Image: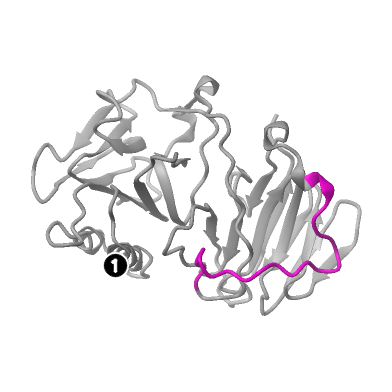
């Protein structure tokens, strides 16, 4: 989860399953592309990811932090963390007081491992004098499953039951701009997305202009995962890649398993506009099927969009089912 960057925000977060990297300001496009290539590789290596961040030369990155989960699926999570410059990582564990991990002036970086980790918070040394006693979230943070975002801070929760929701910390007026829909490209980039083709089943209505402060975001559940709130557009596919350049918009990219390749690389787009949740097939090869409550199953044509009410189901192939749920009370 992350706090979207304010107008003065200067950090970039790169997220893939099992690994998070947060870079300070001034990161060049060359470094960002190289780092994303390493993190999204099928044979991702923590060492190669760290080495992809230069410490010298014109593209040098003075501050960054990377954390990687080394024992996936075990009860006692062990994470390896590296930090350089002003980047800090607050480490929360099940059996000790929180501690702040930083480079401590070591060069080119400081590396350590932590066990029994319940959560991490990435930030900068100027944010606070030390870690808070408990990991708290405001409820306004945005989920990031796979992709890149401009951030003020990042929270990685390995044990969500230990996070305390502090609604008094909620930030007002945080309205992400909606991205347009990409076709079935092997890579989603925010600077290269064609316009949406609204299909015969639905489209935009007057309620799109309703104030976001009066509307609860709907939720999306993918398979058996925990549902998440639909704050920003979501792209779902077999291997959605990107974005490599930031254009001020935020997106969530979700990779789903597809052993028979029924799911296209970039198969489905979901976003909330006003009170309506709009699902769009991204010119997929094998199509998308939707089932509205009390209605028969509908097969979308490639590129079609449809407005879905709560408790609708979307099938994209290989057993992948997406549910649209009402907002949380």
Residue 217 in magenta stretch = no
Q: Is residue 287 left or right of residue 64?
A: right
Q: Does 182 appear above or below 78?
A: below
Q: Is residue 33 shown to the viewer in this render?
A: yes
Q: Is residue 1 left or right of residue 277?
A: left
Residue 58 place in picture, x, y as percent: 17, 62
Mark 1 secondary-structure assignment:
helix
| Residue bearing the label numbered 1 | 30
Give the magenta-colored segment's residue range: 187-207
**Which residue is farthest front?**
7
Q: Quadrant of the C terminus?
A: top right
Nearer to me, 11 or 234: 11
The residue located at (29%, 67%) in the rendering is 30
Q: Does 81 appear above or below 236?
A: above
Quadrant hosting residue 49: bottom left
Q: Main secondary structure of the magenta part?
A: loop
Q: Is residue 257 left or right of residue 206?
A: left
Nearer to me, 308 or 71: 308
Q: Does 180 appear above or below 5?
A: below
């Amino acid at each position: 989860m992350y706090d979207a960057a304010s107008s003065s925000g200067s950090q970039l977060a790169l997220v893939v399953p099992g690994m998070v990297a947060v870079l300070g300001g001034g990161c060049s496009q060359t470094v960002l592309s190289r780092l994303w290539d390493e993190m999204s590789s099928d044979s991702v290596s923590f060492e190669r990811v760290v080495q992809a961040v230069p410490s010298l030369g014109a593209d040098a990155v003075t501050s960054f932090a990377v954390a990687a989960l080394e024992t996936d699926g075990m009860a006692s999570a062990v994470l390896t963390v590296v930090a350089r410059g002003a980047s800090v990582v607050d480490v929360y564990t099940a059996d000790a007081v929180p501690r702040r991990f930083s480079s401590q002036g070591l060069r080119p970086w400081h590396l350590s491992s932590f066990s029994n980790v319940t959560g991490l918070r990435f930030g900068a040394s100027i944010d606070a004098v030390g870690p808070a006693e408990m990991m708290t979230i405001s409820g306004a943070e945005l989920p990031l499953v796979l992709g890149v975002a401009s951030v003020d801070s990042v929270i990685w929760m390995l044990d969500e039951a230990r996070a305390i929701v502090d609604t008094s910390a909620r930030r007002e007026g945080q309205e992400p701009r909606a991205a347009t829909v990409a076709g079935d490209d092997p890579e989603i980039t925010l600077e290269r997305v064609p316009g949406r083709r609204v299909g015969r089943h639905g489209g935009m209505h007057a309620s799109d202009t309703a104030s976001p402060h009066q509307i609860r975001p709907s939720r999306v559940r993918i398979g058996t995962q925990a549902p998440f709130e639909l704050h920003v557009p979501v792209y779902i596919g077999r291997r959605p890649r990107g974005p490599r350049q930031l254009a001020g918009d935020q997106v969530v990219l979700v990779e789903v398993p597809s052993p028979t390749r029924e799911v296209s690389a970039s198969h489905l787009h979901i976003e909330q506009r006003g009170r309506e949740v709009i699902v769009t097939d991204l010119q997929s090869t094998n199509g998308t099927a939707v089932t509205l409550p009390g209605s028969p199953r509908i097969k979308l044509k490639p590129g079609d969009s449809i407005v879905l009410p709560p408790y609708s189901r979307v099938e994209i192939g290989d057993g992948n089912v997406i549910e649209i749920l009402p907002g949380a009370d």
